[in-house]
Image (tube, rainbow, N blue to C red):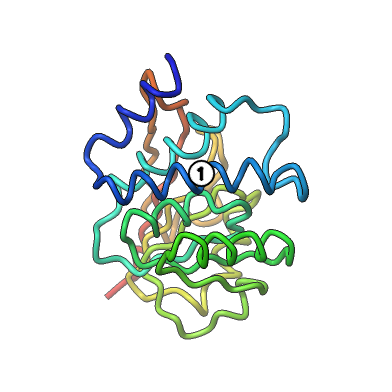
Amino acid sequence: MLKKDIYERICKNVSRETFEKILCYEKLLNKWNGKINLISRKMSEEEILKNHIAQSIELSKLIPGNMNILDVGSGAGFPGMILAILGFTVCLSEINIKKASFLNFVKSELEVNVTVENCCVSKLRGKNFNCIVSRSVTNVKNLLELTKEAAANDVTYMVYAPKDTNFREIKNNYAIYMLTIGNDYVNNRSIAMLKSINAH
Protein backbone atom coordinates (compact mmCIF):
# COMPACT_ATOMS: atom_id res chain seq x y z
CA MET A 1 0.00 0.00 0.00
CA LEU A 2 1.34 3.42 -0.95
CA LYS A 3 2.13 5.99 1.76
CA LYS A 4 -0.52 8.34 0.36
CA ASP A 5 -3.15 5.58 0.62
CA ILE A 6 -2.18 4.80 4.22
CA TYR A 7 -2.54 8.45 5.21
CA GLU A 8 -5.95 8.63 3.54
CA ARG A 9 -7.10 5.63 5.58
CA ILE A 10 -5.72 6.59 8.99
CA CYS A 11 -6.63 10.28 8.79
CA LYS A 12 -10.05 10.09 7.16
CA ASN A 13 -11.82 11.21 10.35
CA VAL A 14 -9.49 14.04 11.40
CA SER A 15 -9.67 17.71 10.50
CA ARG A 16 -7.50 19.20 7.77
CA GLU A 17 -5.54 21.16 10.38
CA THR A 18 -4.82 18.01 12.39
CA PHE A 19 -3.80 16.14 9.25
CA GLU A 20 -1.36 18.90 8.31
CA LYS A 21 0.19 18.79 11.79
CA ILE A 22 0.71 15.03 11.53
CA LEU A 23 2.44 15.49 8.16
CA CYS A 24 4.66 18.25 9.59
CA TYR A 25 5.46 16.07 12.61
CA GLU A 26 6.63 13.28 10.31
CA LYS A 27 8.86 15.71 8.39
CA LEU A 28 10.41 17.03 11.61
CA LEU A 29 10.94 13.47 12.84
CA ASN A 30 12.80 12.49 9.67
CA LYS A 31 14.93 15.65 9.81
CA TRP A 32 15.91 15.29 13.48
CA ASN A 33 16.37 11.53 13.26
CA GLY A 34 19.50 12.04 11.20
CA LYS A 35 21.01 13.98 14.10
CA ILE A 36 19.96 12.24 17.32
CA ASN A 37 18.64 8.80 16.34
CA LEU A 38 15.07 9.11 17.58
CA ILE A 39 13.95 5.88 15.90
CA SER A 40 15.68 3.21 13.82
CA ARG A 41 17.29 4.78 10.77
CA LYS A 42 16.82 1.53 8.88
CA MET A 43 13.05 2.03 8.70
CA SER A 44 11.49 3.24 5.47
CA GLU A 45 8.97 6.10 5.49
CA GLU A 46 6.18 3.55 5.03
CA GLU A 47 7.44 1.50 7.99
CA ILE A 48 7.58 4.61 10.18
CA LEU A 49 4.02 5.41 9.17
CA LYS A 50 2.68 1.90 9.84
CA ASN A 51 4.75 1.13 12.96
CA HIS A 52 4.56 4.47 14.73
CA ILE A 53 2.12 7.06 13.40
CA ALA A 54 -0.70 4.74 12.35
CA GLN A 55 -0.38 2.61 15.50
CA SER A 56 -0.65 5.74 17.65
CA ILE A 57 -3.78 6.86 15.81
CA GLU A 58 -5.32 3.39 16.21
CA LEU A 59 -4.51 3.45 19.93
CA SER A 60 -6.36 6.76 20.26
CA LYS A 61 -9.60 4.95 19.37
CA LEU A 62 -9.31 2.92 22.59
CA ILE A 63 -8.93 5.96 24.88
CA PRO A 64 -11.88 8.13 26.03
CA GLY A 65 -11.43 11.80 25.15
CA ASN A 66 -11.63 13.07 28.74
CA MET A 67 -8.52 11.24 29.95
CA ASN A 68 -5.48 12.96 31.49
CA ILE A 69 -2.73 10.96 29.77
CA LEU A 70 0.89 10.31 30.71
CA ASP A 71 3.19 8.85 28.05
CA VAL A 72 6.14 7.18 29.80
CA GLY A 73 9.42 7.15 27.91
CA SER A 74 7.92 9.07 25.02
CA GLY A 75 11.14 9.09 22.97
CA ALA A 76 10.28 10.43 19.53
CA GLY A 77 6.74 11.13 20.70
CA PHE A 78 4.89 7.87 20.10
CA PRO A 79 2.16 7.53 20.98
CA GLY A 80 1.89 10.66 23.14
CA MET A 81 2.63 13.42 20.64
CA ILE A 82 0.18 11.96 18.13
CA LEU A 83 -2.46 11.75 20.88
CA ALA A 84 -1.81 15.42 21.74
CA ILE A 85 -2.09 16.45 18.07
CA LEU A 86 -5.43 14.60 18.01
CA GLY A 87 -6.64 16.77 20.90
CA PHE A 88 -6.02 14.63 23.99
CA THR A 89 -4.59 16.10 27.22
CA VAL A 90 -1.09 14.61 27.35
CA CYS A 91 2.12 14.83 29.34
CA LEU A 92 5.23 13.40 27.66
CA SER A 93 7.82 12.04 30.08
CA GLU A 94 11.28 11.62 28.53
CA ILE A 95 14.51 11.38 30.51
CA ASN A 96 16.83 11.79 27.49
CA ILE A 97 17.56 15.51 27.13
CA LYS A 98 18.09 15.36 23.34
CA LYS A 99 14.80 13.57 22.76
CA ALA A 100 13.03 15.93 25.16
CA SER A 101 14.48 18.85 23.14
CA PHE A 102 12.97 17.37 19.99
CA LEU A 103 9.59 17.01 21.69
CA ASN A 104 9.70 20.62 22.86
CA PHE A 105 10.66 21.75 19.35
CA VAL A 106 7.66 19.90 17.88
CA LYS A 107 5.43 21.40 20.56
CA SER A 108 6.58 24.93 19.66
CA GLU A 109 6.78 24.48 15.89
CA LEU A 110 3.32 22.89 15.54
CA GLU A 111 1.71 24.77 18.46
CA VAL A 112 0.64 21.52 20.11
CA ASN A 113 -1.01 21.76 23.53
CA VAL A 114 1.19 19.22 25.33
CA THR A 115 3.45 19.11 28.39
CA VAL A 116 7.01 17.80 28.11
CA GLU A 117 8.77 16.65 31.29
CA ASN A 118 12.51 15.96 30.97
CA CYS A 119 12.80 13.86 34.11
CA CYS A 120 12.32 10.40 35.52
CA VAL A 121 8.62 9.61 35.67
CA SER A 122 8.91 8.90 39.41
CA LYS A 123 9.32 12.68 39.90
CA LEU A 124 5.79 13.38 38.63
CA ARG A 125 4.01 13.04 41.95
CA GLY A 126 0.41 14.04 42.54
CA LYS A 127 -0.50 14.58 38.88
CA ASN A 128 -3.47 12.18 38.97
CA PHE A 129 -3.06 10.78 35.48
CA ASN A 130 -5.99 8.45 34.80
CA CYS A 131 -4.47 6.96 31.65
CA ILE A 132 -0.81 5.96 31.44
CA VAL A 133 0.61 4.68 28.17
CA SER A 134 4.03 3.27 27.31
CA ARG A 135 5.51 1.54 24.29
CA SER A 136 9.03 1.32 25.72
CA VAL A 137 8.41 -0.57 28.96
CA THR A 138 10.48 -3.70 29.56
CA ASN A 139 9.04 -4.62 32.94
CA VAL A 140 5.39 -3.93 33.73
CA LYS A 141 5.87 -4.24 37.50
CA ASN A 142 8.62 -1.60 37.39
CA LEU A 143 6.37 0.70 35.33
CA LEU A 144 3.62 0.43 37.93
CA GLU A 145 6.09 1.15 40.73
CA LEU A 146 7.62 4.17 38.96
CA THR A 147 4.24 5.73 38.18
CA LYS A 148 2.31 4.96 41.37
CA GLU A 149 2.70 8.51 42.77
CA ALA A 150 1.63 10.06 39.45
CA ALA A 151 -1.39 7.82 38.86
CA ALA A 152 -4.99 8.52 39.79
CA ASN A 153 -6.74 5.89 41.87
CA ASP A 154 -8.83 4.75 38.90
CA VAL A 155 -5.91 4.73 36.43
CA THR A 156 -5.94 2.63 33.28
CA TYR A 157 -2.62 1.52 31.81
CA MET A 158 -2.20 0.95 28.07
CA VAL A 159 1.09 -0.88 27.64
CA TYR A 160 2.60 -2.13 24.39
CA ALA A 161 3.43 -5.70 25.39
CA PRO A 162 3.94 -9.07 23.65
CA LYS A 163 1.11 -11.55 24.09
CA ASP A 164 3.40 -13.81 26.13
CA THR A 165 4.23 -11.08 28.69
CA ASN A 166 4.24 -12.49 32.23
CA PHE A 167 1.77 -10.61 34.47
CA ARG A 168 2.00 -13.06 37.36
CA GLU A 169 3.35 -10.49 39.85
CA ILE A 170 0.50 -8.01 39.32
CA LYS A 171 -2.53 -10.16 38.49
CA ASN A 172 -3.92 -9.97 42.04
CA ASN A 173 -4.15 -6.17 41.84
CA TYR A 174 -5.05 -5.53 38.19
CA ALA A 175 -7.58 -6.79 35.71
CA ILE A 176 -5.63 -7.50 32.52
CA TYR A 177 -7.08 -7.31 29.02
CA MET A 178 -4.98 -8.17 25.96
CA LEU A 179 -5.95 -6.18 22.87
CA THR A 180 -4.55 -6.11 19.33
CA ILE A 181 -4.46 -3.12 17.03
CA GLY A 182 -3.66 -3.55 13.37
CA ASN A 183 -5.06 -4.05 9.89
CA ASP A 184 -3.83 -3.79 6.31
CA TYR A 185 -2.43 -0.29 6.90
CA VAL A 186 -1.32 -0.60 10.54
CA ASN A 187 1.24 -3.19 11.63
CA ASN A 188 -0.16 -5.44 14.35
CA ARG A 189 0.71 -4.59 17.93
CA SER A 190 -0.40 -6.19 21.21
CA ILE A 191 -1.64 -3.81 23.91
CA ALA A 192 -2.13 -4.79 27.53
CA MET A 193 -4.86 -2.76 29.21
CA LEU A 194 -4.53 -2.86 33.00
CA LYS A 195 -7.25 -1.66 35.36
CA SER A 196 -6.76 -1.54 39.11
CA ILE A 197 -9.00 -3.97 40.97
CA ASN A 198 -8.71 -1.84 44.12
CA ALA A 199 -9.93 1.43 42.55
CA HIS A 200 -12.81 3.07 44.38
**Residue at 47% in and 56% down:** 80
Q: Is residue 105 left or right of residue 192?
A: right
The residue to which callout 1 is attached is 160
Q: Is residue 141 left or right of residue 157?
A: right
**Residue at 45% in and 42% down:** 23
SS for callout 1: strand
Identify whether 159 is placed above or below 184. Answer: below
Viewer-proximal residue among 124 and 141: 124
Q: Position of residue 48 (x, y in %)?
A: 56, 32
**Residue at 65% in and 72% down:** 118
Residue found at the far right of this picture: 35
For label 1, count other residues whose C-alpha is less than 10 Å away and answer few (under 14), some (14-19) or many (20+). Answer: many
Q: Position of residue 151 (x, y in %)?
A: 44, 74
Identify whether 177 is placed above or below 199. Answer: above
- Residue 41 in which image quadrant: top right
Q: Is residue 120 left or right of residue 14?
A: right
Q: Position of residue 65 (x, y in %)?
A: 24, 60
Q: Quadrant of the N terminus?
A: top left
- Count how many numbered circles sit on residues in the image: 1
Identify whether 73 is placed above or below 9. Answer: below
Residue found at the far bottom of this picture: 126
For badge 1, the amino acid type reads Tyr
- Residue 119 in which image quadrant: bottom right
**Residue at 27% in and 75% down:** 200
Viewer-proximal residue among 200 and 186: 186
Q: Position of residue 197 (x, y in %)?
A: 34, 63
Residue found at the far top of this picture: 1
